[in-house]
Image (cartoon, rainbow, N blue to C red):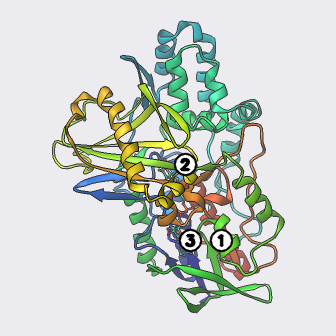
């Protein structure tokens, strides 16, 4: 049996490991941290659970092509339950509630009532949402693979054509520019709070279409459950995860990977799958660094200003029951504040209740994701010994805004936590703590190869390989890496 060494037990690494194991390989995953999941993670503080990764899952819907893949890797089981919050997001515009309903007809009626002067644009938006309900990430097999694995049917692909025709015009504008055409400020705020405003508008429509199709649910138990399910599936199949084992570099001889050095120890293997951030890996895990054309493109496109998606995640445990409030809300701040060189004039928060196990009885958890490239800000703060002080400052500014929105939390904060891009960098080893990559509006999306040209038996998978990233890309690239492995070793790819 050929043995495979995988670097990283995030979603991509676990996926590659599960398929490789099913296909008959002897697989060991080396994970730098003490647990599986990578960016797909959550943490507990004083009895409160802070969701630090997944907010919604593409492929939760049973009729989605990706659903089968999530089931094959054990992420979704018969016991898995999903929350389908509807409205997905609510905008509280100075007391007026403007809702992003999943039901397109209800959404159209509601938005038209909120803003009659935006009717033509709202109708167009809703038509596009319907087109995008059939748009999904196809599940394909690589050429010349020995397998009985099903792929997305041609009928499903043909059904996507009407949405594909809208990709060019929507892809040419950012979510911000798309939303700016609406006259009502609440609709603008709602749309730009649902998807990162710097994404192209295709990302917005893909998201809205996914929600309208009954997909994009939140797995009960969140990131931890998803990752734990996959780690269990891998270990039940006989795979081994070595935690707390950081790979120093991949061993390459005569153009072939033959193992890795893990914490100073040489570990031979017939093949190596790298699922830690590829942008970091091409420079630090290979000696010499990988200089193939695609690697140069990856460095240039990912390190460009505005391309890295990162955030500071502010989490607050409060001793009050907020279960009668909408799950996700965005609102304009009365007093905007400056943070990391940017003016913050609105907030968006998510609420988690005690009944779902996120907080002690009668209490609630609130999380807010402040997305911006704040890496240098936090780095400087740390160098100046002001890191904790800056965290406190950010928390206090956010709390001041939140208390106006949710007066019930005043004086009820039991615990708070700020995870910065430096936290994600330290925890996941990703470049500047980023967990997705943005392609600017109007630019071509570039995907990177699974196999380097000049190193045999070496494969890449993970969020960085196919922008924008996210768990669908992690699972999909992990599957593709396992397929190349099977093809190269003459094995049948088993699902
Ligand atoms: C706040 C937040 C919200 C998000 N929301 C969503 C969402 O709603 N939906 C969605 O789909 N996605 C979401 N994402 C993105 C998603 O979580 C990530 O894109 C995805 O989990 C990436 O998986 P991965 O396996 O490619 O990489 P990672 O998660 O980065 O996993 C890589 C693993 O490799 C390990 N590693 C790194 N270097 C080494 C080394 N040298 N040796 C050994 N191990 C190493 C790391 O510790 C890590 O465990 C979110 C992420 C964050 C942070």
SS under mark 2: loop
Name the one closer to the observer, 73 or 220: 220
Taking the image as shown, residue 405 lies to the left or right of residue 116, namely: left
The x, y position of residue 49, in whole percent, is 30, 53
Question: Which residue of the protein is positioned furthest toward the top in this rendering?
Answer: 117
Disc 1 C-beta below 8 A from ligand 1:
yes
Q: Which residue position holds label 2? A: 374
First reached walking from the N terminus: tag 3 or tag 2 = 3
| Mark 1 or 3: the one toward you | 1
SS under mark 3: helix
Q: Residue at x 65, y 82 (%)?
A: 250
Q: Dot 2, how many residues are within 10 Å of its Cα: few (below 14), some (14-19), or many (20+)?
A: many
Disc 1/disc 3 C-alpha distance (Å): 22 Å
Q: Which residue position holds label 3? A: 19
Per the rendering, the mark at residue 281 is 1
Q: Quadrant of residue 208?
A: top right
Disc 3 C-beta below 8 A from ligand 1:
no
């Amino acid at each position: 049996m050929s043995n495979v060494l995988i670097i990283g037990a995030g979603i991509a690494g676990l996926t590659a490991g599960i398929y490789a194991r099913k296909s008959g390989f002897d697989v060991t995953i080396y994970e730098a941290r003490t647990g599986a999941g990578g960016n797909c993670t959550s943490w507990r503080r004083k009895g409160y659970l802070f969701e630090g990764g997944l907010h919604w899952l593409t492929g939760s819907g049973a009729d989605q092509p990706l659903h089968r893949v999530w089931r094959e890797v054990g992420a979704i089981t018969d016991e898995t339950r999903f929350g389908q919050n509807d409205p997905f997001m609510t905008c509280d515009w100075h007391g007026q509630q403007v809702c992003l309903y999943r039901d397109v007809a209800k959404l159209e009626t509601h938005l038209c009532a909120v803003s009659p002067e935006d009717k033509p644009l709202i109708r167009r938006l809703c038509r596009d949402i319907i087109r995008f309900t059939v748009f999904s990430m196809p599940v394909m097999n690589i050429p010349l693979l020995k397998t009985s694995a099903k792929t997305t049917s041609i009928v499903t692909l043909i059904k996507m054509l009407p949405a594909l025709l809208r990709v060019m015009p929507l892809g040419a504008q950012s979510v911000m520019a798309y939303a700016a055409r609406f006259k009502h400020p609440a609709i603008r705020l709602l749309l730009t709070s649902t998807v990162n405003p710097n994404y192209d508008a295709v990302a917005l429509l893909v998201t809205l279409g996914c929600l309208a199709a009954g997909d994009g649910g939140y797995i009960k138990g969140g990131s931890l459950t998803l990752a734990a399910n996959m780690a269990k599936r891998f270990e039940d199949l006989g795979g081994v995860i070595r935690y707390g084992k950081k790979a120093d570099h991949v061993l390459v001889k005569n153009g072939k990977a033959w193992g890795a050095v893990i914490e100073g120890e040489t570990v031979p293997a017939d093949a190596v799958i790298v699922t830690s951030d590829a942008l970091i890996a091409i420079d630090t895990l290979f000696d010499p660094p990988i200089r193939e054309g695609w690697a140069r493109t990856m460095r240039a496109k990912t390190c460009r200003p505005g391309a890295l998606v990162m955030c500071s995640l502010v989490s607050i445990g409060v001793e009050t029951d907020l279960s009668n409030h909408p799950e996700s809300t965005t609102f304009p701040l009365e007093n905007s504040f400056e943070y990391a060189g940017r003016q913050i004039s609105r907030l968006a928060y998510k609420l988690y209740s005690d009944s779902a196990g996120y907080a002690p009885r009668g209490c609630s958890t609130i999380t807010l994701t402040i997305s911006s490239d704040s890496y240098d800000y936090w780095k400087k703060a740390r160098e100046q010994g002001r890191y904790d002080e800056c965290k406190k400052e950010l928390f206090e500014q956010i709390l001041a805004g939140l208390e106006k929105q949710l007066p019930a939390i005043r004086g009820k904060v039991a615990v708070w936590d700020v995870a910065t891009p430096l936290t994600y960098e330290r925890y996941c080893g990703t470049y500047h703590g980023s967990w997705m990559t943005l392609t600017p509006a109007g630019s071509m999306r570039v995907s990177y190869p699974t196999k380097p040209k000049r190193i045999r038996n070496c494969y890449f998978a993970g969020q960085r390989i196919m922008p924008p990233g996210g768990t669908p890309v992690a699972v999909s690239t992990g599957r593709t890496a396992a397929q190349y492995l099977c093809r190269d070793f003459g094995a049948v790819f088993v699902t």
